[in-house]
Each structure stands twice: as structure tokens, then as C-alpha cells.
Image (cartoon, rainbow, N blue to C red):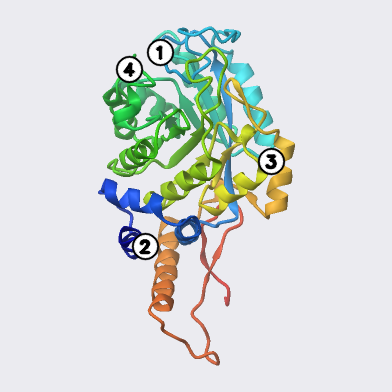
Amino acid sequence: MTVAAANAQTTFSRTAVRHDWHRGEIEALFALPFNDLIFRAATVHRQFFDPNAVQVSTLLSIKTGACPEDCKYCSQSGHYNTELEKEKLLEVARVVEEAKAARDKGASRFCMGAAWRSPREKDMPYVLDMVRQVKALGMETCMTLGMLDENQARNLAEAGLDYYNHNLDTSPEYYGQVITTRTYNDRLSTLANVRDAGMKVCCGGIIGMGENRDDRVGLLQQLANLPHHPESVPINMLVKIEGTPLADVDDLDPLEFVRTVAVARILMPESYVRLSAGRQEMHDEAQALCFLAGANSIFYGERLLTTDNPEATHDRQLFQRLGIHPLDPRHEASDEAHEEALRAQVAEQQAEEQGLFYDAMSKRPAKHVLDRDTGRPTAGATLDS
């Protein structure tokens, strides 16, 4: 093992939530032997989450195609001929109907995406009504509508929107190779407006767009050094769309994708790391490795905006094979109970790492019970209570 890799293992054993990651530290993580990296990520995952609980979201395109942005991966860009059928903004009743169907199939969060540079004022009343009515179904709500100004973010928050998705896509250095119609700072400004309005952030990137590992390091560094880590971090595998400039880019090694998931888990231990676009091209074994590496959220259903996604029945079968169950965030244990359980788990792990032993005949310290629906410790409940 290299000196840098050894130093990385020592540094990350503390599992502190940090916002000051240096490139060299992240590079050292990527350079770890695969087994060591996965073990480290799985250890962090178990400190903060139930490793067998996965949050499930469903994504619906509420307005499709004719986007003025020139994102080179996107079938919805008006700059490329992808033969995508354009659709106007869906009626509110249709959106609510789709949300009910998603809820009945096990989704706890409903995400709505529109192919806009930013929302138009004439469309905002309909968008806000969608949020209110989906929220009334008992689901978490998420939207991705392009760039937001302060007023738009505030209105969405007041309507009850839980999450706003706005990805950074890639590193600042590689960004200009993928998009030219909006800047990296434009994206960061939207994220700041979302935070200031009190909403949670869903923000990640796309892997396999021809970038190198340095760019994957740069993307994760940007995400991990935000003032607050995104609550959800979608890691997308590029879906090659005929007619886009990235249609013929070389395939990414699946193990490099798993490495990226693992490093994201270590850098942002409290975030949900989501397997998003590209799962259709992933073998079950690759997805299983991603779950082992700390992924604990997926998009569920047959479509992700305009690209295929594994069929819901196949996802259920995979969950059954792996012993995974969907997480239900509607019954979250208190933050205080969660923090208390984490302190106890960290103290126990530190004692074991230091070689301390306990009397096998004496009673071991109580371990907190993880709620099956939420993946969080149940308030007041222990294995010996």
C-alpha cells in the first residue's frame, strides 16, 4: 500500500463530517485497493444508516424537450436532433395520478422534472399546485426545473417542496466540455437560493462523459465542500443518446463507477447516495457492489425523464435477493436519538480498533435498534430493553 493510501485510511477512520477536503485526500481514497475502499465506505455507511434500507424515488417528466441549454448528454436539448417527442407542461391532475401510482408501488418520494432553463412565471402557479397536491398524498416532493432565483425558490418552499435537484454534473475544469449555455457559478447560485429558502438539496453528477479520474475527484470535492452537504447525492452513469455529442464516448469501467460511489459515501457520510440514470445498463452484480459501497437510494420505475430505467418488478426481485427493503422516511426517529446511537456506535468501534476487550460474562452495552422503515435508530429502544 502506498504511503498516501495508508495516510488516507488513518485519516478517515474518524468518520468526521467535514467540508474542507483537499484534492490529495480524495485522490488517495480513489487510489486505495478496491477491497480496502469498499470496506472503508461500508463501515462509514453502517455508522450513519441501516445498510439494508434503500430510499426509493420515482421521477416524472412534467415538461419534455425543447430545452434551450446545450448539455451534451441530454436528449431534451433543443440543440440536438434526438427524435424526442416534445410535450407541454402536464396537467396537474395527470401529475397527481402518476404520484399516486408511484406511492402504491412503494416510492416514498416523487420527483418532477421540467426541461427549462428556468421556470417561466406563467407556469409557476401550476408547478406550485403540483407540489401541494403531491405533498397531500403523504409523499416527499422533489423538483428539477433549471435555475431558480431567490423569489422562485422561496415560493417553492412555501408550497411545501422538500427537495430541489440541481446537479453540478462534473468538475469545474471539465464543465466547459459538456455545457456552454450556463456557468458553474450559475449552478452554485441556484443551490444557494434553494438553501436560503429552507429546502433540502439534491445534487450530484454524471460519470462516464469522457472525463478522467481527476474530474471525478473535482466533482466530489465540490459537493463535499459545500457549506452543507446535499441531503441526496445522485451519481448518474451516462446514458448514451443517439444524436447527442456524447453518443459515442467510451464506456466507463463499472468498477470505477463503484469507486466513485464509495468515495462519495466517505466524503458525505450523512447524505443519501443515489443510483440514478444508467442503472438499465448495470448488471445486478454492479448494483449490489454499489449498495455495499454505500449507495442507499434509487430511482424506481420504468422511466427516468426520457431514458429507460430497470423495471419496477426487477427492482423488487433484486431487493429480495439482496435482503434490502425500501426506507420509509415518514416515520423518522428523532435527531437526538439518532445522534445518541451514533455516539454509542462510534465509541464502540473506537474501543475495538484500539484493541480493548470486554468481559464475556458481563452484560455488553446496549445496542440501539434500527427502525426497519427509516433506517434510523428507534428512540428509546435497545436490543436488551
| Label 4 neighbour load within 10 Å: few <14, some 14-19, many 20+ | some
Q: Which residue has dot 1 on it?
A: 69
Q: Quadrant of residue 371?
A: bottom right
Q: Nearer the viewer, residue 307 or 187?
A: 307
Residues at marks 4 and 3, CA–CA distance in whole angstroms: 35 Å
Q: Which residue has dot 3 on it?
A: 315
Residue 240, percent across and down? 55, 23
Residue 9, percent across and down? 36, 62
Relative to 23, is 64 on the left or the right? Answer: right
Label 4: state its secondary structure: loop
The quarter of the image holding the N terminus is bottom left
Of callouts 4 and 3, the N-terminal one: 4
Of callouts 2 and 3, the N-terminal one: 2
Q: Which of 43 and 289 is in front in this view?
A: 289
Nearest to viewer (mark 2 / mark 1): 2
Q: Which amino acid does label 4 sit on?
A: Arg
Of callouts 2 and 1, the N-terminal one: 2
Q: What residue type is labelled 2?
A: Gln
Label 1: state its secondary structure: loop
Q: Which amino acid does label 3 sit on?
A: Asp
Q: Which amino acid does label 1 sit on?
A: Glu
Nearest to viewer (mark 2 / mark 4): 2
Tell me whether circle 4 and circle 1 mark residues in contact (CB < 8 Å): yes
Residue 154 seen in this snapshot: no
Vertical position of residue 207 compared to residue 95: above or below: below
Tell me whether circle 4 and circle 3 mark residues in contact (CB < 8 Å): no
Q: Which residue has dot 2 on it?
A: 9
Residue name at image x 41 percent, y 34 percent: 203
Vertical position of residue 370 compared to residue 54: above or below: below
Relative to 182, is 69 on the left or the right? Answer: right
Residue 42, percent across and down? 50, 58
Tell me whether circle 2 and circle 3 mark residues in contact (CB < 8 Å): no
